[in-house]
């Protein structure tokens, strides 16, 4: 699986102010980050769905199917008014939520970086995903982002990914 492709699509930050279009932050050697307005109903619905299906995520984490190749969790992080949603890896279920290691370089948050041990409370989960038998399971915000791509962008993404996103 090409995680760079997944990260290119999946990292996003919520903007505190209204914006006409989603801003994109491009960084050399890093996946691009797409910003979304905090009032974006599509993204908010996707994040609610992720939180409402955490039992499935926990079951997949605790007893992964033999066909499961990857599992990840995206959490909301905030610092000095900046909000970013980033993936964590090496996930453990705790009484407080989920502990793991940050899988992304933040754009605006300075107190953590790739590999930092972090805690995501259940109410701060913004997505979860698994790759099972080459297909995306969960990945609710990924589906919203992919759905907003132009046909050319979507084709490029799909061609670069080692997994399928079924509609």
Image (spheres, rainbow, N blue to C red):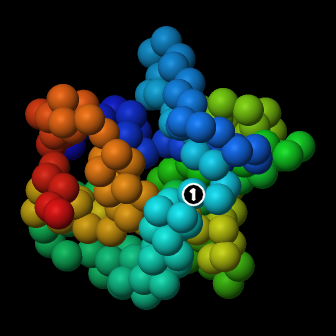
Q: Residue furthest top?
A: 28
- Give x and y (percent) for residue 61: 38, 74
Q: Could you tell me which residue is drawn at 32 percent across and 77 percent down?
A: 60
Residue 104 seen by the camera: no
Expressed as whole percent of the image width and height from the top left, the position of residue 48 reads 53, 76
Q: Residue at x 45, y 68 (%)?
A: 46
Q: Is residue 157 above or below residue 78?
A: above
- Could you tell me residue 67's position as x and y percent? 13, 67
Q: Measuring 70% from the left and 45% from the top, which residue is drawn there?
A: 18
Question: Which secondary structure lies at badge 1?
Answer: loop
Determine whether, in the image, residue 13 is placed left or right of residue 48: right
Q: Quadrant of the N terminus?
A: top left
Q: Nearer the viewer, residue 85 or 112?
A: 85
Provide residue 65's location: percent of width, then percent of height.
20, 76
Q: Residues within 10 Å of mark 1 (few under 14, many from 20)?
A: few
Tell me: residue 122, above or below residue 75: below
Report the side of 116 relative to 140 (left or right). Answer: right
Nearer to me, 122 or 140? 140
Q: Camera-side residue: 157 or 75?
A: 157
- Residue drawn 42% across the image and 45% down it: 10
| Image quarter (top left, top right, bottom left or bottom right) of the C terminus | bottom left
Res 136 visible: yes
- Please give the residue where the numbered disc 1 appears in the rendered image: 40
Height in image: 99 above or below 123?
A: above
40 to the left or right of 49: right
The residue positioned farthest toward the front in the image shown: 20
136 relative to 92 in the view: left or right: left
Image quarter for residue 108?
top right
Q: What is the tally of numbered marks visible in this picture?
A: 1
């Amino acid at each position: 699986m090409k995680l760079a492709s997944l990260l290119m699509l999946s990292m996003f930050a919520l903007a505190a102010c209204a914006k006409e279009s989603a801003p994109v932050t491009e960084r050399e050697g890093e996946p691009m980050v797409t910003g979304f307005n905090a009032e974006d109903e599509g993204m908010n619905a996707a994040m609610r769905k992720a939180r409402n299906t955490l039992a499935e995520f926990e079951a997949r984490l605790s007893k992964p199917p033999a066909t499961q190749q990857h599992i990840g969790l995206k959490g909301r992080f905030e610092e000095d008014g900046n909000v970013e949603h980033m993936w964590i890896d090496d996930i453990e279920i705790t009484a407080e939520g989920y502990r793991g290691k940050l899988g992304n370089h933040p754009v605006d948050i300075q107190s953590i970086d790739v590999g930092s041990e972090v805690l995501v409370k259940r109410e701060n989960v913004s997505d979860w995903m698994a790759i099972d038998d080459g297909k995306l399971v969960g990945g609710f915000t990924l589906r919203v982002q992919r759905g907003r791509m132009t046909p050319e962008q979507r084709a490029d993404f799909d061609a670069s990914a080692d997994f399928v996103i079924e509609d």
